[in-house]
Image (spheres, coloured by chain):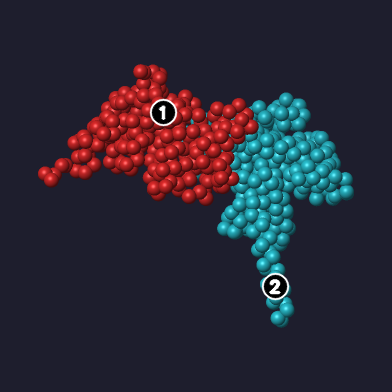
Amino acid sequence: MMSLLEVQEISKLFGGLTALSRVSFSLMPGEILGLIGPNGAGKTTLFNVVNGFYPPSKGEVLLKGEKISHLKPHQICKLGIARTFQVVRPLQRMTVLDNVIASSFLRAKNKAQAQEMALETIRFTGLYEDRNVLSKGLPLGKRKKLEITRALATRPEILLLDESFAGLNPSEQNDVMEIIRKVRASGITIMVIEHHMKVIMSISDRIVVLNYGEKIAEGTPKEIGNDPLVIEAYLGEAQNA
Amino acid sequence: MPLIVFAVLLILPQIGLSTYTLHILILVIMWSVIGMAWNLLGGFCGQVSFGHAAFFGVGAYTAGLLYYHFGVSSWWGLPASVLVLTILSLIIGYICLRLRGAYFALATLALGEVLRVTAENLVKFTQGDLGIMIKQRTWVEKTWYYYIILLIAAGTFFLVKKVIESKFGYYFVAIREDQDAAESLGIDTTRYKTIALCLSGILTGIAGAFYMNYMGYIDPVVVFPLYDISIVTVMVVMVGGVANYWGPTIGALIMVFLAEIIRSMPKIGAAHQTLFGILLILIIIFLPNGIAGDYRKLFRLFRSKGTSSSHLTKTS
């Protein structure tokens, strides 16, 4: 099976700081790939490279075999990669619906169609009741959902989720998990950054682990859970317990 | 609502206004056009410009120079300024729109000044400080000028509303709220910011070209000033209401009348800039959405004052 997204030997330097160093992995169609690692491991930087905010210092990102690593974010979005932000960034002085309409225009021919697509997406993620609320006034749980809704409204093939669970209570976490499963069922491939181990272990098909900008492990959740390198990265060096 | 206002304004000159009143009304409407143009870029798209005098002045000079060099009617300046301002906006956009926030504002501020100094020094082309005078004005009467600027204003209002309610409007506001998020949602931010700048520049330029025709005389200090055009433009929109369809019109009404009243007062007249500054501070503190945006708050303020004062008179 051909991979959908190929990250090849990506390095990213900020001045003298190496944020990513020769990271490679591939994303298969239809899977949920988890991306984990301690704080500062380079997860969000990797998203920013894939999404086009940063050009990589070295290496290439390929989407279905085509180089995309020097395109702008809006072009990459048009090609089918949408993302959410770790720190939620709703368009504050716009209603929830307007937020989603704004991103629906990418694939809509006219305003009526954009509105229709937006409503459909909003129903899908369960924000319909809040559609007329200014997004500034939404509680965090709903803002996180809005991020996902907005990204989905661009009708992506690949969805990059940056800590969509952080700060949510257990019931909200279940909601978002439900949404992610539905998104996958609709045929969208997902890459997700998450700190919450329970969540990532239960939704991912495969997991890539970063530490200090390097890939230290890749495998199924079970393999990752038993990998000594991963345990060391998270818990410090193994003690003779 | 817009139609009612338009109809009232259409009838207004027929009821026998003095030439002076008509002149003030023409200025109000012209400023509302400039304000609406600024609002499109600054209010909706979030790109605050402190250099709209650049567009106004270039529009005015387009009309003036056509007359001066080619001897054609300066009214040709209106269509010609559309072309000239599009080119100018594209150049300015290419240079300035890569800057964000305060940096963009500063760049536009510099731009207005650069154009003023240029117009002052290209003596052969622009007559420098001598300015350009139209020897024979089209009409002595002001009524026709009034109708022309009213038509321009109505067109501007309609255009801004149409644009903001379309995909462009959504994109402009998205860029204002968060440029990076907008970019990652597939919006070509550079392109849409340039479109907003072009529209804003063109509309301001048309107002400038009208000004040349109406006043019959321009020089660099009159059409390119930082304070009297660029800053007043921002004030018109701030006072009236940012990102509000009616804001610039209400702001223009208040600012033009206020300027006239203050100027006619002895001694204080010279300090009108100071007074405007104080007004702006008060507006920002108490009515951050401008008079059109916060009019309910304003009513409440007056009502509570009214009741308390009647209470006072009773006890005394």
Relative horizontal placement of residue A188, taking residue B6 as reference (left or right): left
The mark tally for this picture is 2
Q: Quadrant of residue B222?
A: top right
Q: Name the kind of residue labelled 1 in the image.
A: Thr
Outermost residue on the bottom side: it is B316
Along the viewing direction, whichever of A201 and B47 lies nearer the viewer: A201
Q: Quadrant of residue B112?
A: top right
Do circles 1 and 2 both sit on a common chain?
A: no
Residue at the image position 13 percent from the left and 45 percent from the top = A241
- Give the crowd class for mark 2: few <14, some 14-19, many >=20 residues within 10 Å: few
Residue at the image position 43 percent from the left and 41 percent from the top = A176
Q: Chain of mark 2?
A: B
Circle 2 sits on which residue? B309
- Give the crowd class for mark 1: few <14, some 14-19, many >=20 residues within 10 Å: many
Q: Secondary structure at mark 2?
A: helix
Relative horizontal placement of residue B271, taking residue A157 as reference (left or right): right
Circle 1 sits on which residue? A189
Along the viewing direction, whichever of A162 and B140 lies nearer the viewer: A162
Q: CA distance from mark 1 to mark 2?
A: 67 Å
Residue at the image position 73 percent from the left and 79 percent from the top = B314
Q: Secondary structure at mark 1?
A: strand
Chain B, which colour? Answer: cyan
Quarter of the image that includes the C terminus of chain B: bottom right
Residue B302's spot in the image, x, y percent? 68, 64
| Residue A75 visible to the viewer | no
Chain colored red? A
Relative horizontal placement of residue A208, taking residue B87 as reference (left or right): left
Residue B21's spot in the image, x, y percent? 80, 50
Along the viewing direction, whichever of A148 and B97 lies nearer the viewer: A148
Residue at the image position 32 percent from the left and 42 percent from the top = A198
Q: Name the kind of residue labelled 2 in the image.
A: Ser
